[in-house]
Amino acid sequence: MLNNLKTALLLGLLTGLLVVAGRLLGGQQGMVLAFGFAVVMNFSAYWFSDKVLLRMYGARQIGPDDAPEVYAMVEDLARRASLPMPKVYVLPQAGPNAFATGRNADHAAVAVTAGILQVLSPEELRGVLAHELGHVKNGDILIATIAATLAGAISMLANIAQWGLIFGGGRSDDERGGSPLGLLVTLIVAPFSAMLIQLAISRSREYAADAYGAQLIGEGRPLADALIRLDQANERVPTHADPSTAHLFIVSPLVGRGVSSLFRTHPHTEDRVRRLLELDQRRPQRTPFGFQPRTLA
């Protein structure tokens, strides 16, 4: 229910931002056009954003004959989590990373990069896949995917405003066009809004998915080790990702990249590892792998 409310708020925010920007950029006519564009964008974001995202990264769907070990892991974990079998994709990237996407558990997808299959041990990979299924179980995937679309749309808006300033900024008459001041405001506010959207949704959901993944496999150590290894490996071979989608990945592809590191969409890896190991310490004995986890709030 909470994620549904957040999704509605994000789509409403997208509509409001586009309408205001349309007013600033094109006056009354621009506002009407922006509202129409927002309606189309909201519909597309809900139904097609996951497909657009996977296509953007050149993801290839795999079956049991393509990568049997990975497919079998996802299949087994999905069964233990009482989830429908998600589609499984591989991204042709050397940077080790993974994410989950889709609009609900019945239309979910788990994607891993080619690099992660070379870096992690089977136990560590199982922890990563359990984490991603945690996002599916907790209902995170729709809001995260829509947020990526929203952030991309806002960034596009900023680019339009930038070119508008370069080429004169339109008319100052309210009925015929926007003002250079409106363009300047859009140029400044739009990227900041995109950043706030990403920061607002990401950090708590990563902790929850970590905890769920640890419960699903019975211990937190494999996922903790995977997070450390992935964080270090991405420093050497970074994941090439659009900043608007950075919050989707299990470790941020922007870590350690100059100014981008100031706008982290993920908790610090050290904090995530500490929480996972604390979960193991609080558990009186190792939970059997067949443990049926409860859904985290």
Image (tube, rainbow, N blue to C red):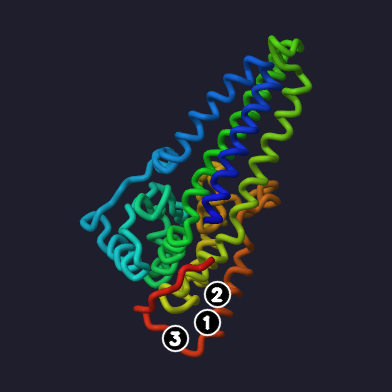
Residue in the picture at 69% in, 9% down: 176
99 relative to 148 in the view: left or right: left
223 relative to 64 in the view: left or right: right
Q: Are marks 2 and 1 in contact (CB under 8 Å)?
A: yes
Asked whether residue 7 appears in the rendered view, the answer is: yes
Which one is nearer the viewer's eye here, 38 or 207? 38
At label 3, counting other C-alpha atoms closer than 10 Å, the crowd grade (few under 14, some 14-19, many 20 or more) is few
x then y, percent, for residue 87: 32, 52
Q: Decide: is 185 above or below 79.
A: above
Marks 1 and 3 sit apart, C-alpha to C-alpha, by 8 Å
- Going by the numbered disc 2, the residue's amino acid type is Leu
Residue linked to disc 1: 280
Badge 3 marks a residue whose secondary structure is loop
x then y, percent, for residue 213: 46, 69
Marks 2 and 1 sit apart, C-alpha to C-alpha, by 7 Å
Residue linked to disc 3: 286
Residue linked to disc 2: 276
Badge 1 marks a residue whose secondary structure is helix
Of the residues under marks 3 and 2, which one precedes in the sequence? 2
* Residue 277 position by quadrant: bottom right
1 relative to 174 in the view: left or right: left
